[in-house]
Image: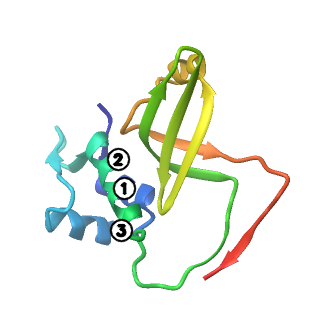
């Protein structure tokens, strides 16, 4: 099972390392010490926490956000549903939940499983810009 340092988890959640550290200190997400003595979060725990954050309204830190969506969304795999031929993979990228349909073979070749870091790449002929 993959695990993440506080800094890596913060990047995946779209917050500062200080915020991720405060959440860990408050017990909102479980941590353990790795062999080097660093606090790490197990991938499955981080995946569950990222979904919880998104459902609660996101991981904002009190700042107004002005964004134009990019085509690469680094995040954490939160669900993998395998069929006989096709598969569905969900990635939580900060406040964004992305769902991709792909072949089962592709999922197996990539070794995708819940708790892994992955990047969803979007190719589209339509671009939407939102301002908050």
Residue at x 48%, y 63% (from the top left corner): 95
SS state under label 2: helix
Considering the numbered disc 1 on the image, is that residue within a helix, a strand or a loop? helix
**Label whose residue precedes the other's in the sequence (3 or 1):** 1
Check the image and report above or below for 37 versus 94: above
Quarter in which the N terminus is drawn: top left
Assess disc 1: are there few (<14), some (14-19) or many (≥20) residues with their C-alpha within 10 Å of its C-alpha.
many
The residue most toward the right is 125
Q: Secondary structure at mark 3?
A: loop
Distance from Cα at disc 1 to Cα at disc 2: 5 Å
Q: Which residue is mark 1?
A: 50
Q: Which mark is residue 56?
A: 3
> 17 or 82: which is nearer to us?
82
Q: Crowding at label 2, few (<14), some or many (≥20) Cα neighbours within 10 Å?
A: many
Depicted 81 relative to depicted 105: above or below: below
Give the image location of residue 131, x and y in percent.
66, 81
- C-alpha gap between disc 3 and disc 1: 10 Å
In space, the residues marked 2 and 3 are separated at their CA atoms by 14 Å
> Looking at the figure, which quarter contains the C terminus?
bottom right
Seen at 56% across and 44% down, the residue is 99
The residue that label 2 is drawn on is 47
- Residue pushed farthest front? 83
Is there CB contact under 8 Å for labels 1 and 2? yes
């Amino acid at each position: 099972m993959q695990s993440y340092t506080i800094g890596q988890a913060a990047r995946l959640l779209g917050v500062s390392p200080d915020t991720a550290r405060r959440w860990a200190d408050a017990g909102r997400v479980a941590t353990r010490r790795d062999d080097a003595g660093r606090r790490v979060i197990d991938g499955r725990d981080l995946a569950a926490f990222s979904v919880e954050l998104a459902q609660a309204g996101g991981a904002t830190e009190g700042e107004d956000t002005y964004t134009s969506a990019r085509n690469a969304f680094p995040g954490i795999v939160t669900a993998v549903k395998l069929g006989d031929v096709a598969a569905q993979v969900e990635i939580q990228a900060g406040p964004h939940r992305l769902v991709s349909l792909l072949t089962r073979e592709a999922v197996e070749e990539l070794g995708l499983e819940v708790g892994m870091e992955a990047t969803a790449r979007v190719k589209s002929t339509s671009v939407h810009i939102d301002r908050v």
